[in-house]
Image (cartoon, rainbow, N blue to C red):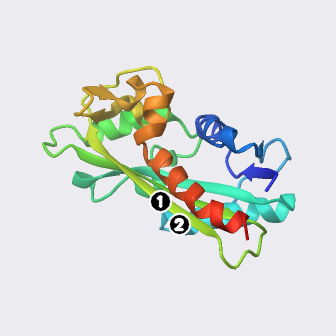
Amino acid sequence: MKKLVIASNNPGKLREFQQMLAPLGIEVLTQSQLGIGEAEEPHCTFVENALAKARHVSRESGLPALADDSGICVEALGGAPGVQSARYAGDSPKSDARNNEKLLREMQGVTDRSAHYYCVLVLVRSADDPQPLIAEGEWHGEVFREERGAGGFGYDPMFWLPQFGKTAAELTHEEKHAISHRGKAMKSLLQKLRPRSGA
């Protein structure tokens, strides 16, 4: 595989994918570079949304595509925001700051702050690939009571990691890739990719 299209327009995700895929020597393109619009994400599960995005971008580009669907799941909120994480505070426009503000409001007075990030990656070699590669990862922490840190994106400034005494937004890129939900999913995907690529 020489080229791969990332099925996302999220600059934070694109940066992370490019950093993680760089050692493989795969040319990473983005769907916006190819003028491909965003796919619908009507499903209630992460895996169905990721598969829909990957197939859409592969169909439009004629190239292998990698899609991610991820979000933060808060125990006290019954797993919300979940698949709605990117548009938790609405779609017009999608905003990390507004999403974080809404989550902080929802968590006022809540004692159980436990939460986890979840990521599923789907790689299709073609739009109709009958055996898409699917990998997942989880990252457990807590919802902090305020935002801290300037790194990362999404809910990172309020995703507290007790073992580090930091939020995800206070980690270096290297620290984050080593332990994050997306980093874990990518490691799993690369393990699955190696035997297939040699077939």
Which of the two residues, 150 or 129, is positioned nearer the viewer here?
129
User: Residue 41: x and y, percent?
Assistant: 60, 61
Amino acid type assigned to the residue bearing label 2 in the image? Val
User: Residue 158: x and y, percent?
Assistant: 34, 32
Residue 109 seen by the camera: yes
Label 2's element?
A: helix
Q: Residue at x 82, y 51 (%)?
A: 2
Label 1's element?
A: strand
Mark number, residue 167: none
The quarter of the rendered structure image containing the N terminus is bottom right
Total count of labels: 2
Residue 40 seen by the camera: no
Judge left or right: residue 57 versus residue 53.
right
According to the picture, the residue beneath numbered tag 1 turns out to be 136
Is disc 2 surrounded by few (<14), some (14 to 19) or many (20+) residues within 10 Å?
many
Mark number, residue 47: 2
